[in-house]
Amino acid sequence: MTRIFRSVRDGIGFDILLIGAALLFLVAFAGVPLIYNVLMSFQQVDMFNLGTFMRPLVGFANYAAVVAQPEFWMVARNTLLFVVGSIGGQFVLGFGLALFFARGFPGAATIRGLFLVSWVMPGLVVGAIWGWILAGDFGVLNYLLKSLGIIQSNIFWKSDPNFSIWAVIIANIWLGLAFNMLLLSVGLHGIPRELYEAARVDGANTWQRFWFITLPMMRSTIGAVLSLGLIATLQQFDLFPAITEGGPANSSMVSQYWAWQASFKLYDFAKGATISVMMLVLVLIASVIYVRSTRHEVRG
Amino acid sequence: MISRRLTLLGALAMVGVSTLTLPALAEPVKLTIWGLDGDNGLIPALAKEFDDKNDDVVVEFRAIAFDELVNEALKAFATNQAPDIICLDNPDFALFSSRGAMLDITDRVAKSDVIKTDLYYAGPLASAMWDGKLYGVPKATNTIALFYNKDLFAKAGIAEPPTTWDQLLEDARKLNDPANNVYGITWSARANEEGTFQFLPWIQMGGGSFKEVNTAGAIKALETWKTMLDEKLASQDVLSQGQWDSTGTFNAGNAAMAISGPWELGRMATDAKFDWGVALLPTETEGGARSSAMGDFNWGIFASTKHPDESFRAIEYFVSQSERLFPEFSNIPPRGDIPLPSTGDAKKDAALAVFQEQLKYAQPRGPHPEWQKISKAIYDAVQAAMTGQMSPKDALDQAQATIKGIVG
């Protein structure tokens, strides 16, 4: 008895206790909802069995029904476009800004801090503001573009199927830009100055210093930024109801908004769960690729 | 001796009376009522009055946002925590009534001195019925009609508002004035319930119904909508704007006509700096079948209630206050026997008279338990056709196939 007691206080028992607490937390707050969701995607759900756990199993019927929806491939295409476009835009512009502020001109740190305002704002507010900027007949962006002579007639960002997904991507790039910039700035800050000095002595030009020092040294930061970006983009929901509601004609419908619409607008909870499980599989594949690509990274 | 016996009897009687009345006083029945927040405070006001007037009842009211109402009710029903009374949007009502979640009040209403079903408009009443039985009572009603800017009509030399779809299109062409930022018409073809709310009347005027959306008339209706967009007689934003925002552009003078409902009247009376009027929705052909949308909520009692009698009494009380619906809460009573008092604004009064006429033709959406899926098939078709993804005929054929899979 005392041995067990001593082990809990100081020894392997204590370790097990710590692991157990962490595992319990994970299972209760992540595992159970996840399993519940996966289970639901294989079940027939209606308002009478909504509150129960065991429901009639339907195999892959929900999956077949989701894929059979006429808008399925359009949603898949839009989701891909939204993820690639948002992450690409956020990363490239964020990296550019990070490099810009890394030059360390007077006030750089303060102004960089102010950029965070966009990241702190709630998505719905950002969506509402971009909704006004992107409005068709009296939008700010159209007015600017027309004044500059770039366009002749108004672009209906929110109502034209050729532009609607880009309207949300533009807003999302703006929203995630500061976060990308901040993480990349931290990464840049961690690169030892001596490397650049040595390279300069060796006669490397700006481009070579960027390509052979900055990028390799930033490898793990970039990996983290991109994978966090993937998660954040697939979780981005607020902008959709505020800007396009997935329309017109599903031209800006992405999987996360589609899942919500199935569950909470059409009250088809099984289909909503099915779509989110399909998304989960995609994220898992992306995570595996990310983990494998960073496995052999050089630790600085 | 006799007197003593009498006292004893008296005392016994006292005890009898107190045992009869005391429990009722000690534990009043608790009624939970769920309803929409907003709506000019109608539901909480009536719920509180019923509470104050009845010592044997305590009312607990919970306000829920429009988007959350059905989800909250579903969750509560699934976990056996449903309220006693709920006020649901009429197209959502069948989701509950068709599955036995609502209390069948057919017999209670038949015996009631307060609720007389023959006084109600046919549309709102139908939305509270399922399979020939009555599960609810319409709270209020509304519909849509055509608003028109009389000043712009005079300027374009048009004497009367359009009465057919062709005239509507013709008038929109005449009124359209891009140089002055004026569109011929505005409405809402949004990809949600609002889009269906606006297009279903056109399907019905074109000889169809929610079960049959690809009739020749319905295809012509969608072609008319598409033409108005293709010729830029309306802003492309009708695809994404709701009715409230779309009518806002009418009030600002940026559209000469607008299709919307009586909820616009208050704002229009102050915002619109021009002469305006309301006309019945144009029909497919002169003198053709009329129809319109039907909005607003229904009262219902959950079948799981432990206090059906008190709940029904509460609904009777709400119905008994119908005269106050319009003057105090700007809700239009769902029945024709209650005259609407003058608002003191001639334009508003004239508009209300048109809306009351239009209400006679208002038809419910459904009722069907899977209404939201039917609705999505309809607004998806409208959007697919108007963005040019599909021809109006193909879009409505696809919607029909989807709807057939739902209604069987």
Image (tube, helix red, strand yellow):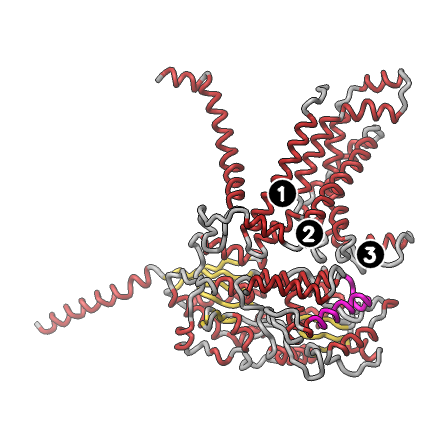
Q: Quick one: label 3 or label 2, which is nearer the N terminus?
A: 3
Are the residues under badges 3 and 1 in a single subunit?
A: yes
Q: Residue under label 1, please give it.
A: A279
Q: Main secondary structure of the magenta part?
A: helix
Task: Using the image, name the chain to which the residue with label 3 belongs.
Answer: A
> What span is colored magenta in the figure?
B219-237
Q: Are marks 3 and 1 in contact (CB under 8 Å)?
A: no
Q: Secondary structure at mark 1?
A: helix
Q: Nearer the viewer, residue B171 or B375?
A: B375
Quarter of image, res B16: bottom left
3D distance between C-alphas at marks 3 and 2:
19 Å
**Closer to the camera in the image, A204 or B65:** A204
Give the residue type that dot 2 points to. Met
Label 2: element kind: loop
In this rendering, the answer to whether B159 lies above or below A225 is below
- Position of residue B308 relative to residue B114, above or below, is above
Q: Which residue is mark 2?
A: A253
Q: Do residues under tags 3 and 2 come within 8 Å of each other at their CB atoms?
A: no
**Judging from the image, what secondary structure is the residue with disc 3 in?**
loop
Residue B266 visible to an observer of this rendering: no
In the image, taking residue B37 as reference, residue A297 lies left or right, namely right
- Label 3 crowd bin: few (<14), some (14–19), many (20+), radius 10 Å: many
Dot 1 and dot 2 within a common chain: yes
Residue drawn at the location 75% of the way across and 73% of the way down: B257
State the image coordinates of residue B14 (x, y, percent, origin top left). Answer: 22, 67
Of labels 1 and 2, earlier in sequence is 2
Q: Quadrant of residue B292?
A: bottom right
Q: Marks 1 and 2: CB-CB under 8 Å?
A: no
User: According to the image, label 3 marks what residue?
Assistant: A155
Q: Quadrant of the N terminus of chain B?
A: bottom left
